[in-house]
Amino acid sequence: MKRFTAATADPDVIIDELLKGGGAVGISGLFSPDQIAEARAIIMAHSEQAAEKATHFQGAAEEAGQLNLQRRVWNLLAKGEVFSQMAAHPVLMNILRRFLGTEFIMGSIAANRILPGGPGQEPHVDYPYWDFHQPETHPVGFNGSFPMNAQVSVLLDPFTKESGATGYVPGSQRALRYPTLQDQFYERCEQMTGEPGDVALFYGVTWHCAMPNNADHDRSAVLIQYLPKWVKPMEDMPAALPQDFLDQASPEIRQLLGLNYPYPEVLDAAKAGNTEGRK
Ligand SMILES: O=C(O)CCC(=O)C(=O)O
Ligand SMILES: [Fe+2]
């Protein structure tokens, strides 16, 4: 994985790496130890109990009765200002505007905590490609030549081979396909390792998954999904956030929540007049 700092994170170089290179990059130096400690404490508090939550790509763990060793905390914007700071970090915004279009949105901001002994996930691609094991449900000719997703993982614990740093197959994003057993993911994968505070940024068409946590410590990350403005987001964040959060949201957070792009809309009830076209 190519690694950058806040100072060297050139959007053109990174975008080339995401689309045509390995599919994932590391960026360090975006968040302070205080921000990481605060985010981690909030996530640990919200996942203390093994409360049942929706999760993804954990079918094998569910069958083995191990779902309690992997915990999600959804709707993080409602749980601390630090998560808005992460979602709208200027270095990330600058890269993502170029990658997904200037009016890109956020589809989800959630934590994935894997406890010691916790199982990994099924190798997969991310939303909105995530059910591409049924390609017939997508348009004919659908491919990954332009991006409809970018994923950010903000690491809150040491992500090592032992602790189950996200595994991925470099270059697998060049052809959109849901990985199969024959693809030998585990023989071919590398891992997005890093220190607390580091960011892994990847294109969700890249085959990847959380790996098993064989360390003696938790392995948590904030996972942020970004989408072009017209892709239906995965989490309904405006519905899940308090009205005063929405009223006070910064222009960047309003954009990320999709509030600048109001479709679908009841056009019969919308303000009269021309609203689209060059003129
Ligand atoms: O936590 C990880 O390492 C990756 C999680 C992931 O890929 C997902 O939930 O889609
Ligand atoms: Fe994923």
Image (tube, rainbow, N blue to C red):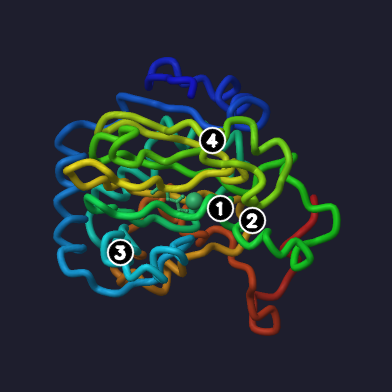
* Residue identified by numbered label 1: 126
* Residue identified by numbered label 4: 187
Q: Nearer the viewer, mark 4 or mark 1?
A: 4
Helix, strand or loop at label 1? It is: loop
Query: Residue 9: percent from the left, percent from the top?
Result: 46, 21
Label 2, residues with CA under 10 Å away: few <14, some 14-19, many ≥20: many
- Name the residue rendered at 30%, 44% in the picture: 85
C-alpha span from label 3 to label 4: 46 Å
| Mark before the other along the chain sequence, 3 or 4 | 4
| Mark before the other along the chain sequence, 2 or 3 | 2
- Name the residue rendered at 35%, 47% in the picture: 212
The answer to whether marks 4 and 1 mark residues whose Cβ atoms lie closer than 8 Å is no
Tell me the amino acid under the disc marked 1.
Asp
**Quadrant hosting residue 276:** bottom right
Q: Nearer the viewer, mark 2 or mark 3?
A: 2
| Ligand 2 neighbours mark 1 (CB distance < 8 Å) | yes
| Mark before the other along the chain sequence, 4 or 1 | 1
